[in-house]
Image: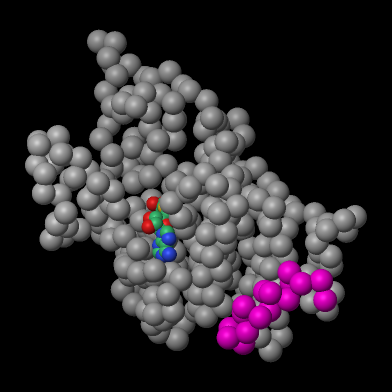
């Protein structure tokens, strides 16, 4: 599919390039903010699974840059934004980058170290595995990322803080809702207008972090397992009680973003220049080391008739 046809088919892809966002995902965070006002009172944020960096750009533009440009700004009082991803990403003003796997305890430690005793006001996680199309499998891998995010949350988020995480809607959505409710009294599943209806993606917006009394982050897995077990659910303060049958939990699910605005599932006509042509814009920031880089190199090499494709390139 050519760039222009994608521009036509995906209005948010086009708008992202026009507004200088590295990915169309920026609109999802902006539309979540329109509904939940998530940036209010926020100065320290962790952006998990951040590459290529459009959420970090939103954080920089909404939090860091206004503070830096304010006449009363002081260097030691600027917002702190720490972004983590498996992939390296091009620099963003005011964003500290950590390259690593969020499911790895060492990465969590690196993030925590940046906060140097202070806690974060918000953790966001737009993590997504490479989707296979097998919904159960994709939902499972996604839930591992949310669990890793929640582990980091229990270490770095201050009481009262927020956690925004991408989820995949599936048969275990109510279980996930109950697990999040153990830590956040207010949990809403939201679908921004820029997230296609055809996608099972949605976002958990969790507010007012309040871990159970006496909670030790080491107990996280044991606690979460108990929500899913029939004997454990009753004695936990989870609004579901029992996850099946007549008492099945009601999950607050909200569409967000201007509902009269652009529809991500529609095609829009392309704006034309005076001479009737359409100029497609280049991506704002192509990924600097995408996982598909080696595959592209191999394809290029094979089209030039080069047979020796076994040796990986020095920078892959
Ligand atoms: N929020 C990003 C933005 O606005 O540009 C887009 C995130 S993209 C949808 C999902 C990201 O999750 C990918 O960059 C991928 O490398 C990252 N990811 C997946 N699994 C991860 C893991 N275990 N640890 C760290 N990052 C991971």
Q: Is residue 221 magenta?
A: yes
Residue 85 vertical position relative to residue 221 in the rendered view, above or below: above
Task: Looking at the picture, tell me which residue is in the foreground, 210 or 303.
Answer: 303
x and y, in percent, of residue 179 in the image: 69, 68
Q: Position of residue 178 (x, y in %)?
A: 73, 65
Residue pictured at 36% horizontal, 56% vertical: 51
151 over 52 or under it: above or below: below
Q: Is residue 284 visible?
A: yes
Image quadrant occupied by the N terminus: top left
Q: Tell me which segment is drawn in magenta.
A: 216-231
Q: Position of residue 220 (x, y in %)?
A: 62, 79
Horizontal side of 67 relative to 306 (left or right) equals: right
Q: Quadrant of the C terminus?
A: bottom left
User: Magenta residues: mostly which secondary structure?
Assistant: helix
- Please report the residue visible at 42 percent of the width from the left and 42 percent of the height from the top: 24
Q: Position of residue 56 (x, y in %)?
A: 39, 57
Nearest to the observer: residue 306 or residue 70: 306
User: From where the camera sits, is residue 164 visible?
Assistant: no
């Amino acid at each position: 599919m050519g760039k222009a046809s994608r521009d036509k088919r995906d209005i948010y892809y086009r708008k992202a390039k026009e507004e200088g966002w590295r990915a169309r995902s920026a609109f999802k965070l902006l539309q979540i903010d329109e509904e939940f006002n998530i940036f209010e009172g926020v100065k320290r944020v962790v952006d998990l699974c951040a590459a290529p960096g459009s959420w970090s750009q939103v954080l920089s533009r909404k939090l860091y840059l206004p503070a830096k440009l304010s006449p009363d700004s002081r260097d030691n009082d600027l917002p702190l934004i720490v972004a983590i991803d498996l992939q390296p990403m091009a620099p963003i003003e005011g964003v500290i980058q950590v390259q690593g796997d969020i499911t790895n305890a060492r990465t969590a430690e690196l993030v925590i170290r940046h906060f140097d005793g202070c806690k974060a006001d918000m953790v966001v996680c737009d993590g997504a595995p490479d989707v296979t199309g097998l919904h159960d499998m994709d939902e499972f891998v996604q839930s591992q990322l949310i669990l890793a995010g929640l582990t980091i949350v229990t270490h770095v988020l201050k009481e009262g803080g927020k956690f925004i995480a991408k989820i995949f809607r599936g048969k275990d959505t109510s279980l996930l809702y109950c697990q999040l409710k153990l830590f956040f009294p207010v949990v809403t599943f939201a679908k921004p207008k820029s997230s296609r209806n055809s996608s099972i993606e949605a976002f958990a917006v969790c507010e007012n972090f309040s871990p159970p009394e006496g909670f030790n982050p080491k107990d996280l897995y044991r606690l979460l397992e108990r929500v899913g077990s029939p004997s454990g659910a009753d004695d936990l303060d989870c609004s579901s009680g029992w996850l099946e049958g007549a008492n099945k939990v009601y999950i607050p699910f909200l569409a967000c973003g201007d509902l009269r605005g652009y529809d991500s599932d529609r095609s829009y006509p392309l704006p034309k220049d005076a001479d009737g042509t359409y100029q497609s814009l280049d991506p704002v920031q192509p990924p600097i080391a995408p996982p598909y880089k080696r595959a592209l190199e191999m394809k290029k090499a094979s089209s030039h008739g080069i047979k020796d494709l076994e040796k990986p390139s020095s920078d892959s």
